[in-house]
Image (cartoon, grey):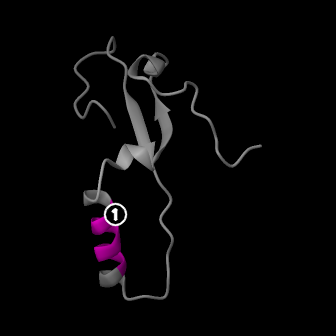
Amino acid sequence: MHPRIRTGAARPWLQFGTTLPISAEDPAVQAEHLEARLIAGDPRTTAEVWGGSHDAGQLGYPWPPVDPHVT
């Protein structure tokens, strides 16, 4: 969620999310893949907006969030 600490209802906020595939690999190996994915770059570039305040569009992301699974 951005901003991390909501200081007031007047500030817009966003919640980003991403779906992680679960494989048959050892959970520790999967955690390492997740860690590498998160530190490789800004997670907002690959994550989706899953929620936010009614004025979250002010932060430069489409509002309401666009569901990529709906055509």
Towards the viewer: 10 or 18: 18
- The residue sitting at 32% across, 16% down in the picture is 11
Sort mark 1 into few (<14), some (14-19) or many (20+) by Cα contacts within 10 Å: few
Q: Position of residue 71 (x, y in %)?
A: 77, 43
Q: Nearer the viewer, residue 52 or 58?
A: 58
Q: Is residue 32 left or right of residue 24?
A: left
- Could you tell whether 58 is left or right of 4 in the image? right
Name which residue lies at 30% across and 82% down: 28
Q: Residue type at mark 1?
A: Arg
The secondary structure that most of the magenta stretch takes on is: helix
Front one among 57 and 7: 57
Q: Is residue 5 above or below residue 25?
A: above
Q: Name the spot of residue 29 as percent of width and height, x first.
A: 32, 83
> Magenta span has 32?
yes
Q: Position of residue 3 (x, y in %)?
A: 27, 30
- The image quarter containing residue 4 is top left
Q: Which residue is mark 1?
A: 37
The percent coordinates of residue 27 (x first, y second) are: 36, 82
The residue segment tinted magenta is 30-37
Residue drawn at point x = 31 percent, y = 47 percent: 42
